[in-house]
Image (tube, rainbow, N blue to C red):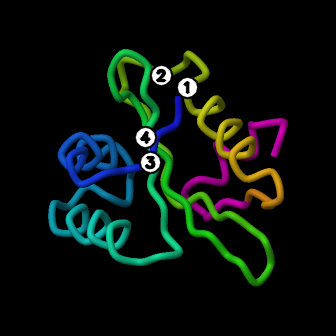
């Protein structure tokens, strides 16, 4: 189930974000989390089953009705189980009017999702 980020999830979110190749540095991680907390067009969602095992971060673009996936990460012990695809599908279901796009980092994964 996709849930919205809250400050109480900061540490788990930073841990999941650290699996992204662009987010290895602690200062960069802290900056990214702060952006999701303060920039209105940025939204961070967490994937929760029994525990929080994934996250997906997006930038909402109202001018062209697009949703840019900036970050997507799944706990390594839960990979190859379709969690990432479930997160993208849930995002699509949550925002059916938005066109889902990806950046250079997330596009190799998002292109594998046949419903985008």
Dots 1 and 2: beta carbons under 8 Å? yes
Counting residues from the start of the chain, the first of labels 3 and 1 encountered is 3
Counting residues from the start of the chain, the first of labels 4 and 1 encountered is 4
Placement of 47 over or under 28, stated as above or below: above
Q: Residues within 10 Å of mark 4 (few under 14, many from 20)?
A: many
State the residue position of label 2.
Answer: 79
State the residue position of label 1.
Answer: 83
Residue drawn at (71%, 78%), measured in percent from left and top? 62
Which of the pair 110/92 is nearer the observer?
A: 92
Dots 3 and 4: beta carbons under 8 Å? yes
- Where residue 32 appears, as percent x and y from the top left, is 32, 67
Q: Describe residue 62's horizontal placement relative to residue 87 as left or right.
A: right
Please provide the residue range marked out in magenta.
Answer: 101-116
Q: Which mark is residue 46?
A: 4
Counting residues from the start of the chain, the first of labels 2 and 3 encountered is 3
Dots 3 and 1: beta carbons under 8 Å? no
Counting residues from the start of the chain, the first of labels 4 and 2 encountered is 4
State the residue position of label 3.
Answer: 4
Placement of 49 over or under 20, stated as above or below: above
Residue drawn at (44%, 55%), measured in percent from left and top? 44
Q: Quadrant of residue 38?
A: bottom left
Q: In this rendering, which labeled residue sits more in front, label 1 or label 2?
A: 1
Residue 73 falls within the magenta-colored stretch: no
């Amino acid at each position: 189930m996709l849930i919205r980020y809250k400050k109480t999830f900061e540490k788990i979110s930073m841990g999941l974000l650290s699996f992204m190749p662009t987010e290895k540095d602690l200062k960069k991680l802290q900056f990214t989390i702060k952006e999701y907390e303060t920039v209105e067009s940025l939204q961070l969602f967490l994937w929760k089953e029994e525990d929080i095992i994934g996250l997906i971060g997006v930038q909402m673009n109202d001018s062209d009705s697009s949703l840019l996936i900036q970050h997507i990460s799944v706990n390594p012990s839960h990979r190859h189980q379709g969690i990432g695809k479930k997160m993208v599908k849930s995002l699509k279901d949550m925002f059916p009017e938005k066109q889902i796009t990806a950046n250079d980092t997330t596009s190799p994964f998002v292109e594998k999702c046949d419903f985008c």
